[in-house]
Image: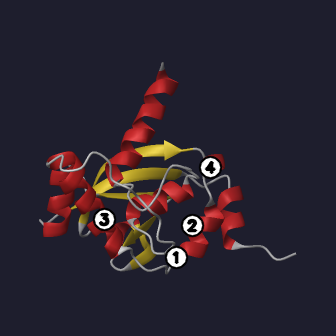
Amino acid sequence: MQVQLWDIVEKSKHTRVWIASSRPIDDKIGSDLIMWYQDTDYSHVLIIINDMVFQASHGYANAVPMSHFLKENKIINRIEIQKDKCDFKYLFLTLGTKYGFTQLWKIALKYILVTRFKIIRRFKYKDNGTKNVICSEYVGNFLRLDWVNDLTDPEDIITYLESIKANHQK
């Protein structure tokens, strides 16, 4: 029987998982625009497993040590996730997948036409079938969220997780 890395990570009693939001330490135009659009203090969503950061950024889905990530970024908040809610196989098999830059343009277009200027009432979304990912899509698929698509942004993920956390605390 062949043991896969994702099985080891998932079954380890030492594995802890968080979904976090972040922003660059230094101003970056893309990040600043996302924070403005979302009206948040973060522009990125990522997965932390123990001391490793898994994310879709810098052109592809990747994993870096937390110490490396924190040289250029600041964690805004963390939400701990139960391991049984996570798809570790997806996480590892998706590493190296190209970043979905065109998806960011679609999100911006949706914001401009629908939310900001209310030019159109509905934004018709059609999945173009690409395998490219953006950060929020990567995290959403890792969490097995069936409502995640190419237009899901970091705020959608964090808002959803915070609402679940608040409901569990009641």
Q: Residue at x 60, y 74 (%)?
A: 93
Q: Please report contact status of discs 3 and 4: CB closer than 8 Å, yes or no.
A: no
Q: Please report contact status of discs 2 and 4: CB closer than 8 Å, yes or no.
A: no
Q: Earlier in the sequence, mark 4 or mark 1?
A: 4
Camera-side mark, 2 or 4: 2
Q: Residue furthest front?
A: 120
Q: Residue at x 20, y 54 (%)?
A: 113
Q: Please report contact status of discs 4 and 1: CB closer than 8 Å, yes or no.
A: no
Label 4: how many residues lie within 10 Å, few (<14), some (14-19) or many (20+)?
some
Q: Please report contact status of discs 2 and 1: CB closer than 8 Å, yes or no.
A: yes
Residue 83 is tagged as 4
Residue 91 is tagged as 2
Camera-side mark, 3 or 2: 3
Identified by mark 1, the residue type is Leu
For mark 1, give the secondary structure: loop
The x, y position of residue 167, in whole percent, is 48, 25
